[in-house]
Image (spheres, grey):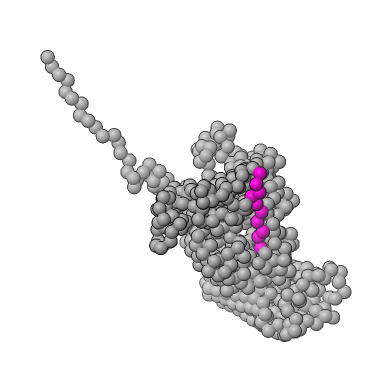
Amino acid sequence: MPVVDLAVSRVRELNKALHQLPRNTNETHWTVQNPAGQHSIAVGIDAPIEVMIEGHVGYYCAGMNKDAQITISGNAGVGLAENMMSGVVRLAGDASQAAGATGRGGLLIIEGNASARCGISMKGIDIVVKGSIGPMSAFMAQTGNLVVLGDAGEALGDSIYEARLFVRGEVKSLGADCEEKPLGSEERAILAGLLDRAGVDVPADSFRLFGSARRLYHFHVDNAY
Amino acid sequence: MSESPPTTPRTPPRFSATFDPYTIAQIQRAAATGIYDIRGGGAKRALPHFDDLLFLGASMSRYPLEGYREKCGTEVVLGARFASKPITLRTPVTIAGMSFGALSGPAKEALGRGASAVGTSTTTGDGGMTVEERGHSKTLVYQYLPSRYGMNPDDLRKADAIEVVVGQGAKPGGGGMLLGQKISARVAAMRDLPEGIDQRSACRHPDWTGPDDLEIKIGELREITDWEKPIYVKIGASRPYYDTALAAKAGADVVVVDGMQGGTAATQEVFIENVGIPTLACIRQAVQALQDLGLHRKVQLIVSGGIRTGADVAKALALGADAVAIGTAALIALGDNNPALEDEYRKLGTTAGAYDDWQDGRDPAGITTQDPELASRLDPVKAGHRLANYLSVLTLEAQTIARACGKSHVHNLEPEDLVALTIEAAAMARVPLAGTDWIPGHPGTSF
C-alpha cells in the first residue's frame, strides 16, 4: 500500500506514478500525506484504485479522474474533480468554486458546503452536496444531476440545458431559463439512488427539482436578457 | 428662328458616405427582423494590413541569396520552453482551430491530409477531437476551450500540443455559436447537447479567472500529460502587449495572437466588425511583451488573422512572429467560395467570393455544413491535395522574399527589412514610412 508524503515528494512525482499504473495493478490503495493545499494532486488517474488524501488540497484535485475512488479528508480549492469522467470523489470538508466543473461522469460527494459555480457546465457528472452551494451554480449545466441538501445561492442554473438540480433547502434566485419542474417518479428514483450512494437518509420528496425552461434553445429577440 | 432652351445641368443622385447603401440595407434588415445579423468569417472592412508593408530587398549593402539553390530554412520548433516533447514543423504556416460542427467531417479530414503532407499542424476547435482529424493529422493541436465540449483526458494525451483558448480575433470577449441547423446527432453527442438547438459556447472558462488561475490551470494540464505537451495560449487581439505578457507569465510555451480579420464559424456582424484590433496592430506589441520578459524566441509567437500569401507570412515573421496560422485561407484552398458553384451561391442569395453564411449549414462546397449530402461533395483527398499545394506556395513565397533579403532562414527576417506605405501601417508595425526614417509614435528611431 504505497504512501506518498508530499512534504518529501513532489506532486509531479505522485501524478507520474499514478499515471504509470496499469489498470490491473495490485497497488490499489494509495495514501497521500501532507498535501498542504498544493494544486493538481491526483489528477488524470486512469485506474480503478483508491486514493486517500490526508489534509487540505489546492486547485483541481482529482481533475479528469477516471475510475479511481479518491477521498480527501480536508477542504478543497477551486475546481475539485473538474472534468471528472468516472469514479467517485468524496470531500470531507468544504469545496471552493467550480467544484465538479464540466464533469462528464462519476460521482462527486461534498460533505460540507460548495462555493460559487458548483457544477458549472456539468456534462453528465452526479454531484451531491450535503451543505449549501454558492451563487451561479450549475451555470450552463448540460446533463447530469446536482443534489443539494442545504440552500442554493443566487442565479441557480443560469442558462441551463438538460441537467437536473435537486435542492432541499432555499433557493435564493433562479438564473435565466431555469424553472422549477415537477418531481416525477423517474426523477425521484434518480434522486433516491444518488442519496443512497452518498449515504444520506432523507426522503426524496423533501427536494424540489429545477431544470431548463428551454426558452433559450433557439435564438429569438424576445429571449434576449 | 427659335432656339431650344438650354437643358438645366443636374447633379447625379448622391449616396451618403455615412448612410451608404450597405448601411441602409442593414437598417432595413434590422427593422424587418428585430434581431442582429449572424455570419461567418472575419472583419470585411478595409483595415491596415500586410499589404501596407513592403520589403527592402538586398542591394549594395545587403547580399541576397540565390533564389533556388541556396538554402533558406523554414522549420520551426514550438514548445521547447517547458514541454519535454516540443513539436517541429517543416513550415511556419499552421492550420488554425476550426471545430467539427462548424466544419464537416470530410473538411476536417482534408485539413489533416493537407497539413500533414507539408509537415505542419492542424488544430481541433470547439467541439472535441474527431477520428477524422486525429487520423489524418500527423501533428494535432487540441484546443482547451471555455465550453470544454468533448474534453477528456484520453484525447488530451493523444494530442501533440494543447491550446488554451482565451479568445479569438473575430470576437475577443465573445463565446461561440453553432446554430441548430448544424447540431446533428453526432455533433450533439460530442458536445453533450440536445440535437438541433442553437448552441452557445461560454465566453469565459468555467474553472479559472485571470492569469494567476491560468498558471495553475496550465500546471494541471501539464500534470495530466506528464509535462510532455507544449501548451499554447490563444488570445483575441485587443490588448496584445498585456495579454501576451500575462500568458507568458502564466507559463505558456507558445502564445497565439489572433487579429480581427481572423474568421469565426458564426458571430454577430456587429461584433466581428467592431471589436478587436487588426492583425498588423498586434504583432509588435506581442513581440515587445516577450522581449521585455526576455522570452522572445523562447516562448514562440503564432500570429493569425488574414494571412493570405507568402508575403503575409514573411511580413509576420519579419515583425517577430515565429509562425502563422491560417483558417479562412485554408477553407478557400479546400474549395470554399469556388466560382464553379456560382449557381448554387445565387440560390442562397449571395455570390462566390462573398459567401459567409457558414452558420446556416447549407454550404454548397460541403465544408461548413453537417448535411450529409452536402458534406459528401467534398473529396477529402483532392481537397487535402489542394491545401497542400497552397501551403507549399505560401512557404515557397516566403522563402523567395527571405532570400531576396539575404536571409538563410525565414526567421532571420526582421523589422529592418520592412517599410510601410501608410502612416497608419508605419505606426502599427513600427517600421519607417517608405522613403523616410519616420516611425510615427517612435521619435528617435531611424533606419
What residue is at 62 percent from the left and 56 percent from the top?
A: B126
Is B372 above or below relative to B165? above
Query: Depth check: B137 or B23 in front?
Result: B137
Magenta-span inclusion, residue B30: no
What residue is shown at x 64% (from left), y 50% (from top)? B72
Q: Nearer the viewer, residue B78 or B44?
A: B78
Residue A46 placement: quadrant: bottom right
Q: Residue at coordinates 58% horizontally, 42% vertically from top-left?
A: B332
Residue B166 on image: x %, y %:
57, 63
Residue found 75% across the figure and 84% down from its top:
A8
| Quadrant of the rendering where the C terminus of chain B is positioned | bottom left
Going by the picture, which residue comes out furthest to the left? Answer: B1
Q: Is residue B210 visible?
A: yes
Stretch of the chain drawn in magenta? B69-79
Residue B219 percent across, percent down from the top left: 66, 71
Q: Position of residue A188 (x, y in %)?
A: 69, 69
Does residue B152 appear left or right of residue B308 in this picture?
A: right
Quadrant of image for the N terminus of chain B = top left
Classified by dominant secondary structure, the portion drawn in magenta counts as: loop
Whether residue A124 appears in this view of the structure is: no
